[in-house]
Structures are given as structure tokens and as C-alpha cells.
């Protein structure tokens, strides 16, 4: 499947029939070898054909049962959309292509990052690959509605290391669905901001709260998040302003009721 997809070869009909008869036997191959082949299939431009051959050969059902239910007849709308999105992917990053392949069974199926952990452990994926896959699935909806999000919420996503891959993933989805292109472009523009604007250094830390006399405990995180949100929204511009806001939050609200002002949990 990998060779046929990579070089655009046709598979001999008798050979393909033999693959179908014996597809379940792929389970005797090591998880590491299967993952290595998937990396090569999904990290090259003909990843759509690779996925189509995996489905038609019966290999997908054994390798990725989470996706097989969606792809079982090969003509379901979610599966055809998945193939179209794979065709639209411009990144050669394995995690981007794999996230698209998993998408109908995870995002659409509502399983999310927890299922990715199971798949990652089963295929012996690297920690980074598992992290990126979960990041893409978890943040797809946020990127596709980016213009409606408070900037601090979006900023926390865009400063993460896998943000570039996330936008490649979201661009392929939006180009096929014909929706949310402006939201993805908005993220691209924001990602080009100078570092000082995209991710300015924090103004205060927990040590500062301690020096203010605020008892250490669960209240620290919501106070610091609220101050950070105010900084990113440019409502707080200096360390002194940040300390004053922290003092007000601690004085005016019981610790359990303090929340970031943009509603971020």
C-alpha cells in the first residue's frame, strides 16, 4: 500500500485480493513497523491514495478500528470528506495527516484526546506525536471560530509549539468544508506577530502574590490567569498595574470565586 501510494503504482489484482484475504494477519507485524509505514504514507503528497488503499484492502479495519466504522463501505460522506481533506493537506508533517485520518472517528465521533492516547500507546507513537495529535483534535474547533474567541484564549493556543501544524490541519479542513477560512487566516496573521506582542513576558508570578500577603493555595492560578488576560488585552501594561489588579482580585473576591475576566477556566 505504501509503495503503490508513494509512487502512484497500480497493485496487481491478484496481489490485492491476497492482501484483502489476509488483512487481519497484519496484527503479527510489530506496532513500531506499522507506525513507521504510516509515517511514510501520511508524510507524502499521495496520502489520500494511501488511506483509500488501506480502507479498500481491509488493513484499516485491523490497524485503526476507531476509523474503520466510518470508512467501512468506502463511500460514506464522512470518509469521502476525510479523503478530500487528506488531499488538501500541504504539510508533510505526519501528525497533521494522521490527525485528518483519525478525525471522523475522533472529532466527529466525540472521542477526542483520550482515544488518541490509546491509539498512540498501541502504535508506540512518540510522546511528541501523541501530544501533537491531541493538540490538533482538542483545538480544531477553537481555530475554526478564532475570530469569535477572546484574544487571551486564542493566544494561549497559538503560543504552543504545535500551533503551526494545527493551522495546517485546520486549513485543509476549511478548504474542503468551504467554511472558516477567514478564521484560519486570522490565526495565521496573529501567529506572525512579533514575539513581544504574541507572547509578552508575564508581569507577575506566584512569588509576587506571596509578597503581597495572599495566602498560597488554589487562588493563585485564577488570579495569575486573570492578570495575564488583562495584560494580553492591554488593560494592564505595567508590573505595578498587574500587582494592583492582583491585590484587588484578592481583596474583592473569595479565593474560590476568582476567575479570569475572559471566562477562561
Image: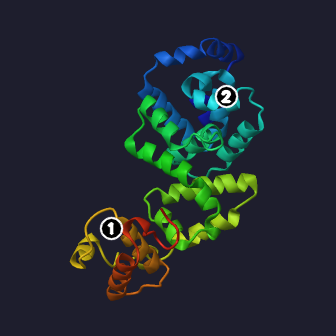
Horizontal side of residue 29 vs 244, given as left or right: right
Query: At 59% across and 39% down in the image, what residue appears?
Result: 102
Q: Is residue 148 visible?
A: yes
In the displayed structure, 107 sits above or below 178; it is above
The percent coordinates of residue 218 (x first, y second) are 33, 62
Q: Residues within 10 Å of mark 1 (few under 14, many from 20)?
A: many
**Mark 2 falls on what kind of element?**
helix
Looking at marks 2 and 1 on the same chain, the residue that comes earlier in the sequence is marked by 2
Q: Nearer the viewer, residue 183 or 91?
A: 183
Task: Kindly identify the residue that appears in the image at 56 percent across and 52 percent down.
Answer: 91
- Rendered position, 258 above or below 236: above
Which residue is identified by label 2? 69
Is 206 on the left or on the right of 136, as rendered? left
Would you place residue 7 above or below residue 94 in this image? above
Residue 220, labelled with which disc?
1
Q: Where is residue 22 in the image (x, y as percent from the top left)?
A: 60, 12
Please tell me in which quadrant of the rendered image residue 204 appears. bottom left
Q: Nearer the viewer, residue 232 or 60?
A: 232
Crowd rating for badge 2 (residues with CA inside 10 Å; few <14, some 14–19, many 20+):
some
Image position, residue 106 (x, y; %)? 59, 40
Amino acid at each position: 500500500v505504501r509503495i503503490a501510494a508513494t509512487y502512484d503504482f497500480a497493485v496487481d489484482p491478484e496481489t490485492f485480493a491476497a492482501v484483502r484475504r489476509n488483512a487481519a494477519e497484519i496484527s503479527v507485524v510489530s506496532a513500531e513497523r506499522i507506525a513507521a509505514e504510516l509515517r511514510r504514507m501520511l508524510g507524502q503528497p499521495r496520502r489520500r491514495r494511501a488511506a483509500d488503499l488501506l480502507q479498500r484492502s481491509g488493513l484499516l479495519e485491523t490497524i485503526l478500528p476507531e476509523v474503520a466504522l466510518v470508512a467501512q463501505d468506502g463511500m460514506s460522506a464522512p470518509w469521502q470528506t476525510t479523503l478530500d481533506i487528506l488531499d488538501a493537506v500541504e504539510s508533510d508533517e505526519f501528525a497533521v495527516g494522521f490527525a485528518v485520518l483519525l478525525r471522523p472517528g475522533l472529532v466527529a465521533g466525540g472521542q477526542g484526546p483520550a482515544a488518541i492516547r490509546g491509539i498512540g500507546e498501541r502504535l508506540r507513537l512518540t510522546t511528541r506525536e501523541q501530544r501533537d495529535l491531541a493538540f490538533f483534535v482538542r483545538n480544531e474547533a477553537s481555530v475554526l471560530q478564532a475570530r469569535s474567541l477572546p484574544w487571551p484564549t486564542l493566544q494561549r493556543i497559538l503560543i504552543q509549539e504545535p500551533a503551526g501544524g494545527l493551522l495546517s490541519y485546520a486549513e485543509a479542513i476549511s478548504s474542503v468544508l468551504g467554511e472558516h477560512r477567514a478564521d484560519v487566516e486570522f490565526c495565521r496573521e496573529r501567529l506572525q506577530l512579533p514575539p513581544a506582542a504574541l507572547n509578552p513576558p508575564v508581569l507577575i508570578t506566584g512569588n509576587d502574590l506571596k509578597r503581597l500577603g495572599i495566602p498560597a493555595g488554589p487562588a493563585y492560578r485564577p488570579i495569575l490567569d486573570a492578570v495575564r488576560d488583562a495584560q494580553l488585552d492591554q488593560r494592564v501594561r505595567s508590573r505595578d498595574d498587574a500587582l494592583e489588579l492582583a491585590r484587588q482580585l484578592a481583596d474583592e473576591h473569595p479565593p474560590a470565586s476568582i476567575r479570569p475576566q475572559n471566562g477562561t477556566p
